[in-house]
Amino acid sequence: MRSIDLHVTGQCCRIFPDASIDALNDLCIPDNTVIISDTNVCCYHGDKLRPYRVIEIEPGEEHKTLKTVNAIYEQLCAIEAGRSWTIVGVGGGIVCDIAGFTASTYMRGISFGFVPTTLLAQVDASVGGKNGVNIQGFKNLAGTFTQPGFVLCDFSFLRTLPYHEIKNGIAEVIKSALISDLTLFEYIENNRLAILSLNKDAFERIINDCLVIKTGIVSRDEKESGERRKLNLGHTIGHAIEKARGYRHGEAISIGIVIAAELSQRRGTLSKEDVVRVKTLLTSFGLPTELKSDKEAVMNAVRKDKKRQGADIHFVFLSGIGNAVVETMSLSELEEVIF
């Protein structure tokens, strides 16, 4: 199988961008492997998980909590899972976050891998070693930086997704293009219909390109002390919108990207034409581009963002399509744009 290898701090994560879940048998010992998945994946794909022990969790952001992790710990203890075991998260970004956090803390850390089943998870959430759960609804306040041993991206899972899950992932694909790859942005513009129709060749292209972008950035800055912050384009506002408005992740990130583009235009680093181009592409996939209400609630959530430093926050700006910069900005400047 073709792989993209991510090397950081003595670890190697092997990412297989066009693999099959059947390859799991070559990477794990079934008797010493536990799969963590949610009820939706088990309903549609339970037959693919059958050779393994499965711990089933409830889907949804509201279950991405320490309470869920504790319940998994108890089940791992009940089956006497040891330090030589492997946990495999099979599901979307929430499942991968929970599985990675559980594995990196159970018995001070056991090996783990992912089989991401959504576009969002394949291009972003499963790669990079960030594992976390929410505290009081605020995103990823408890977490670790620990790399999975492998990530298997199986396109067949994407065919069973509702369109809103595809949209979630498209927002992250566009984000990746905006921060690092003008050619990918143009490819998405020119192949929108192929992407909307779930054309396998188109998806292999965008998934591969996103993985190359993210692994390159993470290999240079694993712990997010500099360049990796670029991956947060749209996420400072996006996470706040998720918290305050209950939007799906991709929808919230789409609005966050537009606000970042407008702030970049105000600072003179992005042209008005490029702002329109960004909005047009997001809109063409049915993603929202405007925050219409609950703006005070959104700002209150921003003030609790873990990237905040006093009255300032690390924010990702665009300096042209395909290039991003991270700068410190005041919360008051952000408020001016939102309100």
Image: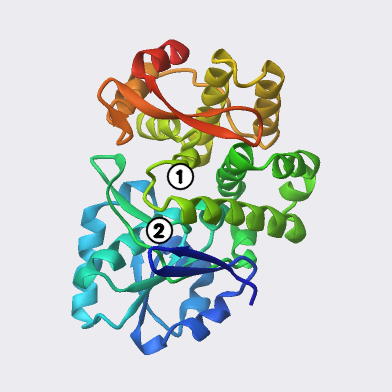
Residue placed at 57% from the left, 47% from the top?
169
Three-letter amino acid code at the position of disc 1: Arg
Q: Is residue 120 visible?
A: no
Where's the C terminus, which quadrant? top left
The residue labelled by disc 1 is: 228
Three-letter amino acid code at the position of disc 2: Gly
Q: Indicate which disc residue 285 carries.
A: none
Q: Is residue 284 above or below residue 159?
A: above
Query: Which of the two marks, 2 or 1, is nearer to us in this view?
Result: 1
Residue placed at 67% from the left, 16% from the top?
272
| Chosen colour scheme | rainbow
Q: From mark 2 to mark 1, how far is it between C-alphas? A: 12 Å
| Residue neighbourhood size for the residue with mark 1, other residues' Cα within 10 Å, grouped as few (<14), some (14–19), many (≥20) | some
Asked whether 40 or 321 is in front, the reply is 321
Q: Is residue 148 visible?
A: yes
The residue labelled by disc 2 is: 129
Where's the N terminus, which quadrant? bottom right
| Residue neighbourhood size for the residue with mark 2, other residues' Cα within 10 Å, grouped as few (<14), some (14–19), many (≥20) | many
Residue 66 at x, y percent in the picture: 22, 54
Residue 160 at x, y percent in the picture: 61, 60
| Secondary structure type for disc 1 | helix
Q: Is residue 294 left or right of residue 265?
A: left
Q: Quadrant of residue 229?
A: top left
